[in-house]
């Protein structure tokens, strides 16, 4: 398919002969040579260079700023599951890219597609936004915007805590205190953007990166309570922020640069992209999501427009993959052709493989563009082509027309996709379809690569295939905004060949449910506040929860709905207990509290309700898995104890006299620093988990993620000259009623000595508040 093209460009009476275009290539077998430099009288943008990893859960996915994703322009970089340090990483996807195409009023085809061209400078996309007046850009703008803007959920939570504390009368909140990801977010009008990134923020009526506009002025200012969100069109009233969010902008104009991938006419499309993911204890932990917002900066309509996701999903080894789709779910999926990924022993020319533990992966278009009636388009077609194998009409596209034909659901030579076999039957008059292989692999009556028909009784040959998942057609007017939202879903090791994909479909249904609910995940229970009383070689801790919104567990009333549980079950998590840990040093992370070298439990208390031991179920590969044995499971589930509860009722104070990291004489030492952290936890078991059917509640235990603090405490002898005042019974529980009656929520205690220690006890005798007063501190 090598093609040689000669370009003649005439301007100012001069002729320039351009070197031949580089031939198409297989990036897995050879490196592509650098593309020749093309002549352009403007200083065109150069190939996008920035890369970043989406890396917050069980997936590590590479992102790029040039319309291509999930590779490093040499190797596949959509790694799932994420390996432990020292283990080889296996990529489920080699590369993917965004395809766009349609016709202007003069009937000219406009195309922008990205496959492997950025490897050698043959680009159809470049970084940065376009001018609203003429749809152009410059090399200066492209270079500035060749970057990503990343923010984490933890940064947003810290920002909101600081803003609310300042708003409610605390210390002033200043720009330099705003977490970096929040401060530098490219929301429209951000007054801190230039100081953070040293180039001006583009302005646009269509906005930039999504944000929650707390004061409603249409401008992003974190000191007014604004914060980054994923700005989905149907979730405008939901302040949705994930655990990791990455934003970038790219375009297909490139300062007059020539489309090297398709040789197509530029559309003048600006694309604002957001990748996001969640770290959870359910199937979302194995997923990633992206939103691409398309803004037509051209001055004329674009008709018969398609938006598509092109993908080369290798699933480890690239020589033995099958593909399919479920049109009812808008889902394309990829699975292995046999029960070994690669050759016997799991080899594939040096490419890491999944061996005998092979997953399946899928791409769901959750939202496509709008048609002319403003109805949402889903997956309108699912096509594929092979890398050099098969008839010429079914191989890699070379011209804009061939790219467009694949996008619109036919073969590159214009032959319609036909139901059955491999789908390519030139001249066949019947059974046309837009969806390749819509039958489930384990359904012998469906059309799949496992069961293509009588012509292929053992299934289709396993080639290296690429797919095009399209949404369209529609007409775009100047300034029109559309979006393509898709997610990658994953199912771990399956029974091959011709696997049952029920677990993948379940994961996709879960993802669709969360998408429909604007990703409103169960909000973890907040950790309590801990007040410590420092005494002679001993410490007393007091646990309290502030009124909302400071804490969601005030009066231990935490109750959180579990989204997307299918069935009539108890679907709320409720407060169950408290945990307090001593830390080995002040640098211990909240995520390391289960490591006995770093943290040790010194206090536990929980509700008296018959629930003591609380488990979460984990999975691991079955070392005795035998695919030849019916019913043999490749994954084993086992219960992992999260907490051993006392089930004796909640206590709000605890007494410490020993150092948990010292053996022998371990009494606390005066004037030495000790470090502690506290968590609350909640419980739900809507149905006991069955490890054989894999039904029921795998995650009984939910622990705190917010308000987790490091407490540095120093035992010391009591101060002399302080009167000790004890208040029993405790008026603490009148606090809320006092505030509801119009008070300010402050408990008043009068007639105290000028210098004293005050201890307040509950009706049950638990210490719930302690403070010291001196002559300079009002009671």
Image (cartoon, rainbow, N blue to C red):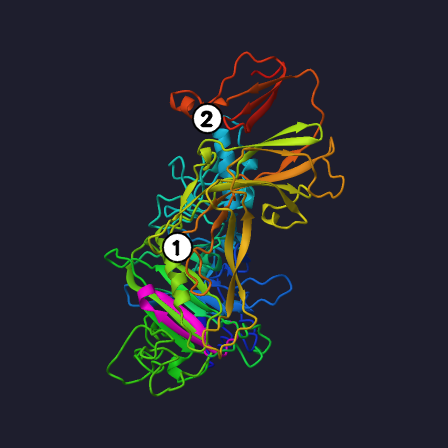
Q: Quadrant of residue 757?
A: top right
| Residue 726 shows in the view | yes
Q: Is 91 covered by the magenta stretch? A: no
Q: On the image, numbered disc 1 is attached to which residue?
A: 135
Q: Nearer the viewer, residue 729 or 534?
A: 729
Q: Quadrant of the N terminus?
A: bottom left
Q: Residue at x 52, y 34 (%)?
A: 162
Q: Is residue 127 above or below residue 426?
A: above
Q: Secondary structure at mark 1?
A: loop
| Left-right relation of 102 to 145 | left
Q: Nearer the viewer, residue 690 or 610?
A: 610
Q: Residues within 10 Å of mark 1 (few under 14, many from 20)?
A: many
Q: Is residue 754 above or below residue 38?
A: above
Q: Position of residue 701 (x, y in %)?
A: 49, 49
Q: Quadrant of residue 382?
A: bottom left
| Residue 259 shows in the view | no
Q: Residues within 10 Å of mark 2 (few under 14, many from 20)?
A: few
């Amino acid at each position: 398919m090598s093609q040689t093209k000669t370009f003649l460009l005439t301007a100012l009476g001069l002729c320039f002969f351009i070197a031949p275009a580089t031939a198409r290539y297989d990036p897995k077998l050879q490196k592509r040579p650098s593309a020749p430099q093309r002549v352009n009288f403007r200083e065109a943008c150069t190939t996008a260079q920035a890369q970043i990893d989406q890396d917050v859960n069980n997936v590590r996915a590479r992102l790029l700023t040039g319309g291509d994703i999930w590779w490093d322009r040499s190797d596949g970089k959509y790694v799932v599951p994420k390996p432990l340090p020292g283990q080889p990483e296996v990529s489920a996807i080699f590369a993917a890219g965004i395809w766009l195409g349609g016709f202007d009023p003069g009937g000219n085809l406009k195309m922008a597609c990205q496959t492997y061209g950025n490897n050698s400078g043959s680009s159809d996309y470049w970084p940065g936004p376009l001018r609203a007046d003429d749809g152009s850009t410059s090399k200066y703008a492209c270079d500035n915007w060749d970057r990503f803007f990343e923010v984490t959920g933890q940064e947003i939570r810290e920002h909101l805590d600081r803003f609310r504390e300042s708003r409610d009368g605390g210390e002033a909140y200043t720009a330099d205190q705003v977490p970096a990801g929040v401060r530098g977010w490219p929301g429209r009008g951000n007054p801190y953007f230039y100081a953070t990134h040293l180039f001006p923020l583009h302005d646009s009526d269509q906005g930039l990166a999504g944000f929650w506009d707390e004061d409603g002025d249409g401008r992003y200012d974190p000191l007014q309570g604004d914060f980054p969100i994923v700005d989905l069109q149907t979730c405008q009233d939901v302040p949705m922020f994930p655990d990791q969010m990455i934003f970038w902008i790219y375009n297909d104009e490139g300062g007059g640069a020539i489309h090297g991938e398709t040789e197509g006419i530029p559309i003048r499309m600006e694309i604002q992209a957001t990748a996001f993911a969640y770290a959870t204890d359910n199937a979302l932990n194995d997923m990633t999501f992206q939103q691409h917002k398309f803004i037509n900066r051209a001055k004329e309509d674009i008709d018969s427009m398609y938006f598509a996701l092109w993908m080369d999903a290798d699933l480890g080894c690239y020589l033995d993959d099958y593909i399919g789709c479920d049109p009812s779910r808008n889902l394309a999926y990829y699975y292995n052709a046999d029960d070994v990924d690669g050759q016997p022993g799991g080899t594939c020319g040096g490419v890491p493989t999944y061996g005998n533990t092979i997953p399946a992966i899928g791409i769901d278009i959750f939202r496509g563009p709008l048609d002319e009636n403003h109805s949402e388009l889903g997956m309108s077609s699912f096509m594929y082509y092979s890398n050099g194998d098969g008839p010429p009409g079914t191989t890699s596209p070379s011209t804009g027309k061939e790219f467009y034909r694949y996008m619109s659901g036919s073969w590159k030579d214009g032959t319609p996709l036909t139901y059955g076999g491999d789908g390519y039957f030139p001249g066949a008059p019947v059974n046309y379809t837009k969806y390749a292989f819509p039958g489930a692999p384990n359904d012998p009556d469906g059309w799949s690569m496992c069961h293509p028909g009588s012509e292929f009784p053992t299934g289709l040959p396993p080639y290296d295939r690429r797919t095009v998942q399209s949404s369209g057609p529609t007409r775009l007017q100047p300034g029109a905004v559309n979006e393509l939202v898709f997610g990658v879903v994953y199912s771990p090791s399956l029974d091959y060949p011709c696997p049952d994909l029920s677990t993948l479909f379940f994961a996709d249904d879960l993802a669709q449910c969360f998408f429909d609910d604007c990703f409103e995940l169960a909000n973890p229970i907040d950790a309590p506040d801990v007040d410590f009383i420092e005494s002679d070689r001993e410490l007393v801790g007091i646990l309290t929860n502030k009124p909302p919104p400071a804490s969601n567990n005030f009066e231990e009333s935490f109750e959180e709905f579990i989204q997307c549980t299918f069935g009539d079950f108890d679907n709320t998590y409720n407060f169950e207990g408290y945990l307090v840990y001593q830390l080995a040093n002040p640098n211990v992370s909240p995520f390391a509290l289960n490591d006995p070298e770093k943290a040790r439990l010194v206090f536990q208390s929980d509700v008296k309700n018959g629930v003591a031991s609380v488990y979460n179920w984990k999975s691991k590969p079955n070392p005795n898995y035998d695919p030849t044995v019916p019913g043999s499971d490749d994954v084993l589930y086992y219960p992992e104890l999260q907490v051993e509860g006392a089930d004796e009722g909640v206590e709000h104070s605890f007494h410490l006299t020993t150092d948990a990291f010292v053996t022998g004489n371990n009494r606390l030492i005066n004037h030495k620093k000790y470090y502690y952290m506290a968590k609350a936890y909640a419980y739900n078991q809507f149905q006991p988990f069955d490890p054989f059917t894999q039904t029921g509640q795998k995650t009984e235990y939910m622990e705190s993620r917010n308000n987790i603090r490091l407490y540095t405490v120093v035992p010391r002898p009591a101060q002399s000259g302080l009167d000790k005042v004890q208040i029993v019974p405790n008026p603490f529980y009148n606090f809320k009623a006092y505030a509801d009656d119009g008070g300010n929520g402050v408990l008043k205690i009068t007639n105290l000595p000028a210098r004293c220690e005050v201890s307040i006890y509950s009706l049950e005798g638990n210490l719930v508040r302690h403070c010291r007063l001196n002559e300079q501190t009002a009671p």
